[in-house]
Image (spheres, helix red, strand yellow):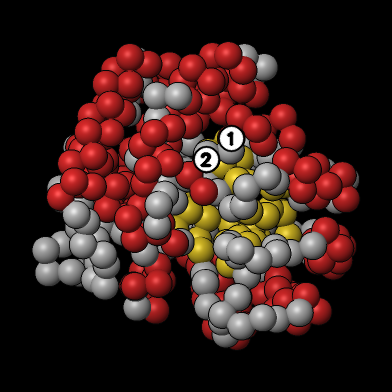
Amino acid sequence: MPPFQIDGVVPIVPTPFSASGAPDWSAFKNLLDFALEAGVCAVCLPAYASEFYKLTDVERRDAAIQAVALSDGRIPVVAQVNHFSTAYVAEIARELERAGAAAISVAVPRLFNLPERDLLRYFDRILKGLGIPLLIQDFNPGGATVSVDFLQQLRRQHEHFRYLKLEEPLMSERVRAIVDGTSGELGVLEGWGGVYILELIPAGIVGVMPGLAVADILQLIWKLARRGDQDAAYSAFIGILPQVTYSLQSLEFFHHAEKSLLTARGLLPAPLVREATLTVAPDDQAHIEFLNQKVLQWLDHLGLGRQPSSKGREAIA
């Protein structure tokens, strides 16, 4: 496999569950095959959209190792390790590197307010034990994310600190400041379902980390926008924006909408979300299903197919 490089869509793979509530690893390969045929540049798990916070430590590790094994070198796997213990993250990150992960993703530990000098120490220890790229996810609703100075310091100390994922509105100016402040050496990715993709590609992002269910359409949008065809990218985007924005009303609601769409596309046997989770009201479920049907019709319109295939991948390319 060539050196790891992000240029495009890196979807978060959800965790499929059986009726008993256990992870359904038999359904996992189908999701990874979907990502491969969608033409994305990598996949990431187990992250927030994988319900990582409901998985046991063993299940989180198993999810990443299963993904590496099932992908069999066909697509890079970014293994996410979120924990407030530095020692734990460092240990598991090294194990996942040995298992074949292409990169490691770690969320900024924000259970309590830590000054950046302490966050530097946290990530310094993790990076010292790694030989593959690190992606930092900073998801801090209502609060400030890491500063450019923090990013510059960590990048100077560790060249394999390569990527930053942000999930905040009005971040085009911030993206430009990070790109300029690190001489383009640190790649910025947008999360939050790819809602701001058209604004942020001209600002300099290197990729988008959305859910998996519309990853093929977002990959097409990415290609069109990067080629400079903003009108075509916009035209492709408007067909999925209602579903994406509706699903992001809350993280737990997102799991239900995402898994419902994956089920509608024939990629999950059932849209099972692990407890504890919210109860989706009948009107909300009906609107989820209405929007999902619109996405299916949009896939047909774009010629991508409801289940990606080599033909759909040619359309994206």
Q: Residue furthest front?
A: 283
User: Which residue occupies 51% across, 64% down?
Assistant: 80
Front residue of 108/124: it is 108
Tell me if I can see residue 26 in this picture.
no
* Total marks placed: 2
- Furthest residue to the left? 19
Q: Where is residue 162 in the image (x, y as percent from the top left)?
A: 72, 54
Image vertical order of residue 115 relative to residue 178, above or below: below
Residue ID for mark 2:
194
Gap between marks 2 and 1 measured at Cα: 5 Å
Within 10 angstroms of label 1, few (less than 14), some, or many (20 or more) residues? many
Which mark is drawn over residue 120?
Answer: none
Question: How far across and how far down the image is residue 31, in percent?
Answer: 31, 45
Residue 255 horizontal side relative to residue 77, left or right: left
Quadrant assignment for the N terminus = top right
In the image, what residue type sits under mark 1?
Answer: Ile
- Residue at 23% x, 39% y: name it: 287
Q: Residue 24 vs residue 313: left or right?
A: left
> Tag 1's secondary structure?
helix
Residue flagged by tag 2: what amino acid is it? Gly
User: From this viewpoint, is residue 139 visible?
Assistant: yes
Secondary element at image label 2: helix
When the figure is inspected, residue 314 is found, relative to residue 271, above or below; the finding is above
Residue at x-position 27% and y-position 53%: 256
Q: How crowded is the residue under tag 2: few (<14 C-alpha within 10 Å), some, or many (20+)?
A: many
Check whether the beta carbons of the residues at disc 2 and disc 1 lie within 8 A of each other. Answer: yes
Q: Name the residue under label 1.
A: 197
Give 206 or 112, whichever is nearer the viewer. 112
The spot of residue 145 in percent (x, y) is 70, 63
Question: Which residue sits at x=37%, y=43%?
Answer: 246
Classify residue 264 by image quadrant. top left
Rendered view: 244 above or below 256: above
